[in-house]
Amino acid sequence: MNWFISMMSSTIGRKLIMALTGLFLILFLVVHLSGNLQLLKNDGGESFNTYAQFMGHNPLIKVVSIGNFFFILLHIVYALLLTLQNRKARPVGYLSETTKTSNWNSRNMGILGTIILIFLVVHLQNFWFKMKFGYVPLDDMGYKDIYMETKEAFSQWWLVALYVVSMVFLASHLAHGFQSAFQTLGLNHKKYTPAIQFIGKAFAIIVPLLFAIIPVMMFFNLSF
Amino acid sequence: MRKLNLTLKVWRQKDDKGKGKFETYKLNNVSEESSFLEMMDILNEDLATKKIDPVAFDHDCREGICGTCSMVINGKPHGPLQTTTCQLHMRSFSDGDTITVEPFRAGAFPVLKDLVVDRSAFDRIIQAGGYVSVNTGVSVDANEIPIPKDIADEAMDSATCIGCGACVAACKNASAMLFVSAKVSQFTLLPQGQPERHRRVQKMVAQMDEEGFGACTNTGACSAVCPKEISLTNIARLNREYLTAKVTAQEV
């Protein structure tokens, strides 16, 4: 066990946690997005409510969702640990502007992450908390009509704007995080790294964009 | 030949316990052909005639191979060019410029005086495992151990690290990952480095953490200022080597 403790308490071990939890959360985004895109189906919410019912009651999903919350927490805790360590590593800063030899988002993952966390709290309070503990009227199938709740929520322009802006921050976080996770895991190769970097950039644009389209389309009553 | 009139903002600190502050000096008629360190020499001559303590700064070979010079010039380690400070010339500046000169900043690199920092943390990382144990004896023939050309090149690229510490100075976390990764890579890639492969990386990373360097955020700021252009693939290799060593080494 000694080796494991020393590995996990090293800087590389801490970054390993960031990378693994980050990649899990990236996978979560894909699942979450594919489910949520059903909100845009032109069926009065039938398929989305069925999906929400399944997600709320399937035991496997329940276990995974506990894991998901745990990994989010771990991602935050280790980000704090690393940030504190990194701050301590440079007690006195520079007078002159530090060089811009790196991208803004790569240097400010903590700020981007904090903004995403604030969004996450608002987002959970809007929907997840309501679905779990609040009162939601039932639809024709007898399922909680979370589709109607979402539609009402996204009839407020400011909430739509908040969601769209938050996705810009998510995109920026992902643009660095995706490829950075592979670098931290040591998965670097002449053949595959260019592909990882390309997929990372594409993922960082496409996924937040699709997430942002949902509230916008619902606001304008558009569907497929 | 251009002559430059400069305003220098230089960090002055009496000793390792002193608080230190920036002092502003005017320096006129500096030849654009002088190197940055020669400009500092001219400044110091000027200060000496005025009975002011000259600015202490590290320098040795002045030909870009020893890694001793260590200044942050206008916010960039080694200044505007991707080279060592000694290889930087005043032609990179313009007449009337204000140049800020600071020491490398890191908790693990305490300032000793003015622009001189203590980089013995790097020495201790090397002592922890950055070597190959061999029995000395008769020298073996060249090519006794076959090494593919591309591998030899890669190991050589890593071995060009001169340990100047610009990577630490540039990193927002004052992380030494680029340095350690270069030093681990040069041995890991070659057959001579195999017997101590797992032990080496674990000990060097442990010492790196012990010295109080930060973690790697993969921003790439280090590689962008490295006078020897050590690449970030070294850091990926270090991560890979460290995690593999921890998980697979026989020591419990």
Image (tube, coloured by chain):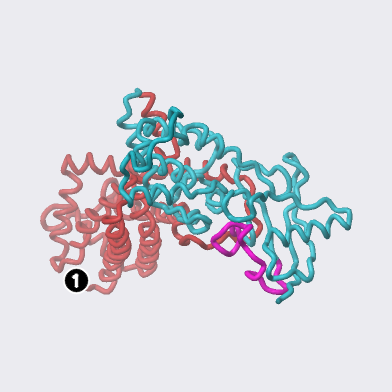
Chain colours: A red, B cyan
Q: Position of residue B50 (x, y in %)?
A: 88, 57
Q: Amino acid at mark 1?
A: Ser
Query: Which image quarter: residue B142?
Result: top left
- In which quadrant will I find the C terminus of chain B? top left
In the depicted structure, whether residue B135 falls above or below residue B72: above
Question: Residue drawn at (17%, 62%), measured in percent from left and top?
Answer: A45
Check disc 1: other Cα within 10 Å, few if <14, some if 14-19, many if 20+: some
Residue A146 drawn at (x, y percent): 22, 56
- Evaluate whether residue B58 shows in this view: yes
Q: Quadrant of residue B40?
A: bottom right
Q: Nearer the viewer, residue B15 or B87?
A: B87
Q: Residue B61: where, in percent of width, then height? A: 63, 51
Q: Quadrant of the N terminus of chain B?
A: bottom right
* Residue lying at the far left of the rendered structure: A141
Q: Is residue A17 visible?
A: no
| Chain of residue at mark 1 | A
Determine the residue positioned at 47% across, 42% down: B180
Does residue B214 appear left or right of residue A144 in this picture? right
Viewer-side residue, A199 vs A141: A199
Residue B68: x and y, percent? 62, 48
Q: Secondary structure at mark 1?
A: loop
Side of A102 relative to B41 (left or right): left
- Left or right position of B13 against A132: right
First to last magenta residue range = B76-98
> Could you tell me which residue is drawn at 29 percent across and 49 percent down?
A134
Q: Which residue bears the numbered disc 1?
A: A223
